[in-house]
Amino acid sequence: MNAEPQTIEAEEVETFEHVSEPAGRVVAQAGQSLAARQQQDNLPATATPMAMIDRALAMGADPGTLEKLLALQERWEANQGRKAFDEAMAAAKAEIPTIRKNRTVDFTSSKGRTHYRHEDLAEIASTINPVLGKHGLSYRYRVQSEVNAPISVTCIVSHRLGYSEETTLTGPRDDSGNKNSLQQVGSTLTYLQRMTLKAALGLAASEDDDAKASGQSGGPITEEQASKVRALIEETGTDIAKFCQYLGIEAIPEIPASELPRVLTMLQKKRSAA
């Protein structure tokens, strides 16, 4: 069975205007010859630039004509790549779920208290990578950083056919939270990687899923509640590092308010069993 060839769509036909008059005659002749052959084979009378190049070669086209036809082929392939990229992006975005905010930032400086929740890069990657790969998409970063200068991060999203698009953001070094110079660079770099990727893919982040399910605030526990948890941890001889790892947090104050009842019940049961 003969495979159905790809066609040149209406808007792509305009690119033939870039071919010179002699080359145009060769193109027309090649197209007519190809159409006649396809009719004999009961195929649709369609043509691609590469098929027309093959016919032009068979008809003894001059090098100048072939060069113009090759340029036409390159433009056609680039347009096909862009279309494939757009289709893959649309399909992927329809399948990527809302990303859960899994990290809490909470510190106090001379400017006051800073507190917010966000999704880290690992959470984003684990959510989107399987979907992107399914549709032939991938991403990478290009970083520009000079001494005493802002940091620029470019997220490049590519399709397997070769088409890619870039999103660039620039930001100063993050001097919040008593960071040293390397930590300032690392913090800004990670932040810009997250934001350029989200912007490039049009991603959205949700509030904490457990908090939404329970109707409670997505914020962390209060300092008073944290003190109560610490007291129970000490009383039961619980390993704080393992406890935090189990909850997916880095410190006791990061415990989501929605998780507090479960945490207290767990520690109280351990105390009763001792």
Image (cartoon, helix red, strand yellow):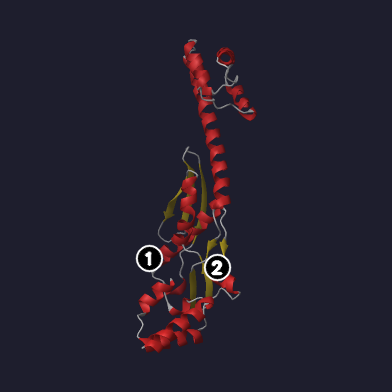
* Mark whose residue sits in front, 2 or 1: 2
- Mark 1 or mark 2, which is nearer the start of the sequence? 1
| Residue under the point 52% across and 75% down | 114
Q: Residue at x 39, y 77 (%)?
A: 243
Q: Amino acid at mark 1?
A: Leu
**Is there any visible trace of residue 208 in the rendered image?**
no
Task: Identify residue type, mark 2.
Answer: Asp
x and y percent of residue 222 in the render? 52, 83
In front here: 127 or 186?
127
Residue count near mark 2 (Cα–Cα under 10 Å), binned few <14, some 14–19, many ≥20: some
Kindly check if marks 2 and 1 are in contact, taking CB atoms under 8 A apart as contact.
no
Residue designated by label 1: 182
Residue occupying image coordinates x 54% and y 48%? 92
Q: Is residue 123 above or below residue 272?
A: above
Residue topped by disc 2: 209
Percent position (x, y) of residue 132? Answer: 49, 48
Instruction: Please rate how many residues cluster around mark 1, counting C-alpha atoms within 10 Å: few if below 14, some from 14 to 19, many from 20.
Output: few
Mark 1 falls on what kind of element? Answer: helix
